[in-house]
Image: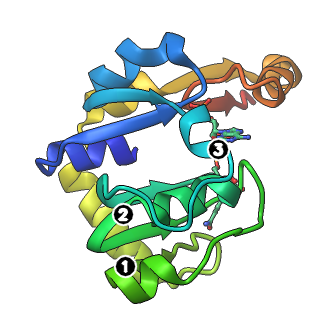
Amino acid sequence: MAVALLSKLGYTVVAATGKVSEESYLKQLGASRVMDRAELSAQGKPLQKERWVAVVDAVGSHTLANACAQTRYGGVVAACGLAQGPDFPATVLPFILRGITLAGIDSVMAPLARRQLAWDRLAKDLDPAKLEAMVEEVPLARAAEKAAELMAGKIRGRVVIKISI
Ligand SMILES: NC(=O)c1ccc[n+]([C@@H]2O[C@H](COP(=O)([O-])OP(=O)(O)OC[C@H]3O[C@@H](n4cnc5c(N)ncnc54)[C@H](OP(=O)(O)O)[C@@H]3O)[C@@H](O)[C@H]2O)c1
């Protein structure tokens, strides 16, 4: 979603993934470049070369710490997930020396008015064809199979379980 939205807004987007086989899919969504997420997941220095104007992070842990350490002066990092872990092994250096902002993103308790704003932006900024490419629909009978694939890291995008009555 972030790749599709930010590329549409004119940003040069770098997508980090563990699935290097999905490079062409991510480029089709709008990524200019695809990097191996292993580059970001190990412990790094507290302040690193400035690489990003902003980061959307669904991963947490060392990846989030490295994202902050590589964000350029005045940039913003959005923390929205913990796929790698809930820890945040970072220092205050990117905050006090580069003035970066760490923005917490919550979709569970977000008030309706804020959701409405987000939905309006999605309606305007998200290409429906790209949304189609991200979603796979399967019948309820295949839910367990898809759940196992999800846990094995073999799912791309979203799986919608169709419940037929
Ligand atoms: N902020 C909120 O309100 C909110 C709401 C719902 C969920 N969440 C959190 O947001 C995160 C993403 O949710 P999702 O539904 O998009 O999950 P998801 O479909 O499982 O996607 C998570 C992605 O993270 C990457 N990943 C998995 N393990 C990783 C690891 N050890 N290190 C680095 N990257 C890893 C994988 O990308 P690749 O396969 O491309 O490498 C995976 O596709 C989850 O942590 C979830 O708990 C937050």
Residue under circle 2? Answer: 71
Q: Position of residue 33 (x, y in %)?
A: 30, 28
Q: Position of residue 95 (x, y in %)?
A: 44, 84
User: Residue 41 got which mark?
Assistant: 3
Question: Decide: marks 1, 2 in contact (CB < 8 A)?
Answer: yes
| Label 3 neighbour load within 10 Å: few <14, some 14-19, many 20+ | some
Q: Residue at x 63, y 29 (%)?
A: 159
Q: Quadrant of residue 161?
A: top right
Q: Residue at x 60, y 78 (%)?
A: 91
Q: Nearer the viewer, residue 66 or 11?
A: 66
Q: Is residue 96 above or below residue 115?
A: below
Q: Position of residue 132 (x, y in %)?
A: 39, 26
Q: Amino acid at mark 3?
A: Ser
Mark 2 to mark 3 CA distance (whole Å): 15 Å
Mark 3 to mark 1 CA distance (whole Å): 20 Å
Question: Disc 3 or 1, which lies upstream in sequence?
Answer: 3
Q: Is residue 91 above or below residue 8?
A: below
Question: Disc 2 or 3, which lies upstream in sequence?
Answer: 3
> Quick check: can you spot residue 149?
yes
Q: Residue at x 29, y 31 (%)?
A: 31
Which of the image's four quarters has the N terminus? top left
Question: Decide: marks 3, 1 in contact (CB < 8 A)?
Answer: no
Residue under circle 1? Answer: 100
- SS for callout 3: helix
- SS for callout 2: strand
